[in-house]
Image (cartoon, grey):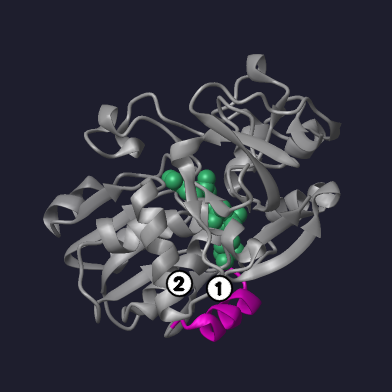
Amino acid sequence: MFAVYAARIDADDPLSGLETGERPDPEPPAGWTTVTVRATALNHHDVWSLRGVGLPEDRLPMILGCDAAGVDEDGNEVVVHAVIGDADAGGGDETLDPRRSLLSELYQGTFAQRVAVPKRNLVPKPAALSFEEAACLPTAYLTAYRMLFDKAGVQPGATILVQGAGGGVSTALVLLGRAAGYRMWVTSRSEAKREAALKLGADQAFASGARLPERVDVVMETVGQATWGHSLRSLRPGGRVVVSGATSGGVPSAELNRVFFTQLSVVGSTMGTRDQLARLLRFLEQTGTRPRIDRALPLADAAKGFGAMIEGVQTGKIVFTP
Ligand SMILES: NC(=O)c1ccc[n+]([C@@H]2O[C@H](COP(=O)([O-])OP(=O)(O)OC[C@H]3O[C@@H](n4cnc5c(N)ncnc54)[C@H](OP(=O)(O)O)[C@@H]3O)[C@@H](O)[C@H]2O)c1
């Protein structure tokens, strides 16, 4: 089958290890099934994999991609949950299973015509969502859902700052947060992305690092080192930063004096459970919210999508169709 895969690791030139071509069809083990992929979406995770973060050389070649929407062996339209883990081993939450992985880390990913997944990981796709829209959800939107509704610990009406407005997770945070009644503020390095965020429903948009008109209840961090200091300075006393990524680097100054003196909380968040993915799908149906798609490309042109993400020019999700 046709697939897009990591053939080599290069930390400095990730695109040089990306290849497209024929790979063996999946052979699902007991309890797994095969999904025919109708749409898939790019995440920064796929760029990290090409850089060798979470994907050692000895697992190559590895088909990339965490996200998929498609058709199961019985012809049902499904969304694929990307977390491969045992909920029992995680106390009822598969993201807390110490041995959990994401598709494309240990098992072949979704940038292919077909992908093998545990049967438990299939969630029915609502008819109201297109395959392209549904493909955006399992990683970026599920991560945003959990950050907002599980980890943020504030009620609708609270003010939430999202760092790096253009990213896949960031646009998801703005769309979902706004639909749930939070006051969503964003920062971005790019004026065009700030304008795009306002169109998506952000209440205010600021240049990265700008002083805010007032302090916020929660900051959503996926940028990391480049924005961390601003995130801590922007919180009200007792506020919380929810962090699920560190695109610009993972070792900022911890600023412990500020953390204890203003009694801040730092909370990590990763992906979400299958049940949260099912609730996210219903949330979109109930509110009419739809994912922001930056561009849709044929899977054969995946390298163009990777290039755009590495440059950081996208607003929203980059979708591929096999
Ligand atoms: N823990 C999890 O489960 C989980 C799930 C999904 C994603 N993630 C992580 O979260 C991060 C975002 O993922 P994504 O797929 O949304 O990526 P993305 O679409 O590439 O978004 C990254 C955004 O970060 C901002 N940014 C990047 N470098 C920056 C810099 N040097 N200074 C300031 N801003 C910068 C940019 O915003 P502006 O251009 O608007 O400033 C960019 O749009 C990644 O690191 C990813 O690995 C983690």
Residue 156 position by quadrant:
bottom left
**Amino acid of disc 1:** Ala
Residue 313 image point, x, y percent: 70, 63
Whether residue 64 is situated above or below residue 308 in the rendered picture: above
Q: Nearer the viewer, mark 1 or mark 2?
A: 1
**Magenta extent:** 189-202
SS state under label 2: helix
Q: Is residue 194 magenta?
A: yes
The reply to whether the C-beta atoms of the residues labelled 1 and 2 are less than 8 Å apart is yes
Residue 306 image point, x, y percent: 74, 49
**Amino acid of disc 2:** Leu
For the stretch drawn in magenta, the main secondary structure is helix
Count the numbered circles shown: 2
Residue at x-position 85% and y-position 47%: 300
Classed neighbour count for the residue bearing mark 1: other residues with Cα under 10 Å, few (<14), some (14–19), many (≥20) = few
- Camera-nearest residue between 316 and 109: 109
Residue at x-position 40% and y-position 49%: 244
Q: What residue did someone put label 2 on?
A: 284
Image quarter hosting the N terminus = top right
Q: CA distance from mark 1 to mark 2?
A: 9 Å
Q: What residue did someone put label 1 on?
A: 128
Classed neighbour count for the residue bearing mark 2: other residues with Cα under 10 Å, few (<14), some (14–19), many (≥20) = some
- The mark nearer the N terminus, 1 or 2, is 1
Residue at x-position 62% and y-position 28%: 52
Left or right of 265? Residue 61 is: right
Ligand 1 falls in quadrant = bottom right
Residue 293 in sight: yes
Q: Is residue 38 magenta?
A: no
